[in-house]
Image: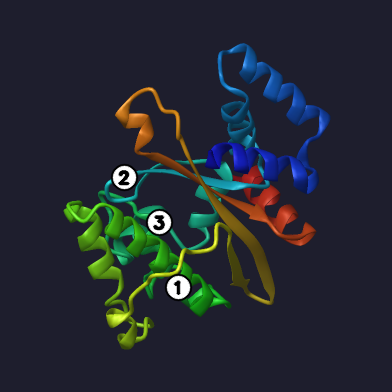
Amino acid sequence: TQAAFTANFYASIGSETDEALKMTENFLKKGYTAEQAKLKVVWENPSIASICSAMPNMTILQANVAAEAFIGLLGPKEDVWRRVGCVEQPNIMRLTLHPQGLQPLLKNWQQVCTLLLSRLHREVTADSSNRELCALFNEVIQYHGIPTQWRQTLWSEAPQPVLPLQVGMGEQSLSVFSMISTFGTAIDITADELRVESFFPADDISAAFLQQLSANG
C-alpha cells in the first residue's frame, strides 16, 4: 500500500532514530499495523508537515503542528482560507494552486501545477460521478497563472508519486517533497476515503526550518 511505501521511504531517509523506533513500538502495542505505526510517527515528527484530507472533495480534516505553522506563514488562518475561497472547507488544492495562496511563492510553479492537475484529473476520471471533485478541477483549471491551453489538455500520463516543492521564503528557499498515503485495507468506507499528505524536508535547512516552526507553533 502507499502507507507502506511512505513508511519504507521514511526509514530510508535516515529518520529511523531510537526515538522513532520507540514511538513505533508504542503504536504497535496499541493495535496499529506496522505501516500505520510508521505513519503515526511521521505525523508526529516536527520536521515533517502532514495534512489529512477526505474525499470526495479533498477537504482538509486535520493538520499537524508543522503544517498548521507553515500555513500560518501566509497570514491569519481564516484570512488565508478566505483569500483562496474555502473558509468552510479548507482545501489543499486551492491553497497550493490559487494565485493568493502558495502559487506566487513556488519557484517550481509549472512543475507543481502540472503534477497536481494531472493527479486531480486522474481522480476525476476514476470517479466521473463525483460532482464535487469535477467542480474542483473545473475551478482550479481557471485560476490566473495556469495556462489557458491546459484547459484542453488530456492528462493521460500517470503523475510522479513524489511531488517536489521549492518555496521562496524571503532570501531563503524551503525545499520539500510530498507523498500521499491512503488506507488500502481500511475497515470502513470512512477510513477508505482518508488520505495523508506528508511534506518531507529535502535538505537540512528545510528540516531545521520546519522544526523551528513546530516549536514556535
First along the sequence among labels 1 and 3: 3
Q: Which amino acid does label 3 sit on?
A: Ile
What residue sits 40% from the left and 56% below the top?
92
Mark 1: few, some, or many residues within 10 Å (few <14, many ≥20)?
some
Marks 1 and 3, Cα distance to the nearest angstrom? 13 Å
Q: What residue type is labelled 2?
A: Met
Residue 3 placement (x, y as % from top left): 55, 38
What residue sits 56% from the left and 28% below the top?
36
What residue sits 66% from the left and 66% below the top?
174
Marks 2 and 1, Cα distance to the nearest angstrom? 20 Å
Marks 3 and 2, Cα distance to the nearest angstrom? 12 Å
- For label 1, the residue is 113
- For label 3, the residue is 92
Mark 3: few, some, or many residues within 10 Å (few <14, many ≥20)?
some
Front: mark 1 or 3: 1
Q: Is residue 14 left or right of residue 185?
A: right
Out of 152 and 175, give the one closest to the viewer: 152
First along the sequence among labels 2 and 1: 2
Compared to 63, does 201 lie above or below?
Answer: below
Residue 12 placement (x, y as % from top left): 76, 45
Q: Which amino acid does label 1 sit on?
A: Cys
First along the sequence among labels 3 and 2: 2
* Disc ID at residue 55: 2
